[in-house]
Amino acid sequence: MRVLARVLLAAAFVLTGPALRAQGALSIQGFGYPGGQLSTQALATGGAMAEFDPQSPLNPAALGVGKRALVYVQYDPEFRSVSLPGSKVSTTTARFPLFAVSGRYGKATFGLAFSSYVDRTWTNTFVDTQVVSGEKIGSRLAASSAGGISDLRVGMSWTFTPRFVVGIGAHAFPGENRTSIGRLFDDSLKFGNFSSSSTMAYNGAALSVGVVAIPVTHLNFAASARLGGTLRIRMGDSTVLGEGRVPGRYGVGLAFDGLPGTVFSARFNTERWSDLKGLGSTALQLHDATEAAAGVETIGPHLAGQTTVLRLGYRDRGLPFSADANTVKERSITGGVGLPLARGNMAVDLAVAHAVRTSGGISETGWIVSVGLAIRP
């Protein structure tokens, strides 16, 4: 059974390469798609505001930016199309990437966030011909996966002064992948069919620290780091299939609010995905990834007596997993609006991101529609 488990795990990763040529996506190779753990508000600025955003579970010091208790939920469907020579395939993935609650007590702000770290939900199929007992027979090979790895963070920030806030966070990384592989022959009565499934579970831990400061009037600075601990993958609840580390992450952000009602921001982030070595198949291509983003947030028109907020952004990053040695590049143009409701006790954030991903002559277009709801009791 242990040998079978290892074979299934390796096959699940290897199959994503050839299957991509028939149906699939550049963004869901390997352990899945890393959305970036961005709230709708941060996504609308291309992620440029993420280091200052109390809803995005990246910088624990950003919890101190929130003024009151908060409950936050988010929904992000993505509509993808993959262009190959002579064909085009469209898919849709629904994600609920973020839930967060926070509250303040004195100079301390506490927060609990549950977010999607990597999402590995896909279905790939392709048609081929097999030789069985000297006879050629058509077949369809299908591989599918559901699940991913999540990030459960418990964080706290401490406000020393209005111009200097520090934070610390403890992370648990639970997860599960339900993987199925099967082959359906055209003449199933004569040759029969094959199918097999497995469930892999993940568990890991990490620690994060961060700071938000205003060193110069109107110039805001933020930085955070995540120090990864051991991350294991198991077959069900028992057999350990592999062991790596939660990828280390480092990010810095700048924001300028010298113009009334407008904030310009920029962010640089790097993540050491090579820390995952030892967790999956040796055929899995891993790439450390960097990310750069720039965005703007400004006061918009009044709606029903409330002031709206308009946001625009640009995001350029590499994705960590690929089917071959070619890194997947992703460039996104983003925009959105913030709508306060119930006299400021609620807010709805809307965002749209148009992402273009390229690698080795294959291109993919993704439209991500994000809806975030914040309740401030």
Image (cartoon, rainbow, N blue to C red):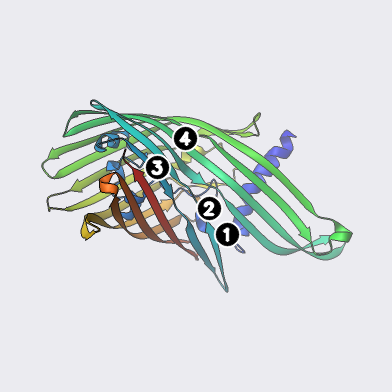
Q: Which mark is residue 24?
A: 1
Q: Mark 2: which secondary structure?
A: helix
How crowded pointer 4 is (Cα within 10 Å; few <14, some 14-19, many 20+) is rated as many
Mark yes or no: residue 280 visible. Answer: no
Q: Mark 4: which secondary structure?
A: loop
Q: Which residue is mark 2?
A: 28
On the image, the x and y values in percent for residue 188 come to 84, 60
Mark yes or no: residue 282 visible. Answer: yes
Q: Which residue is mark 3?
A: 271
Q: How many marks?
A: 4
Residue type at the position of mark 2? Ile
On the image, the x and y values in percent for residue 141 come to 71, 58
When asked about the image quadrant of residue 111, the answer is top left
Q: Is residue 163 left or right of residue 360?
A: left
Q: Which mark is residue 246?
A: 4
* Residue at 38% from the left image edge and 36% from the top image edge: 101
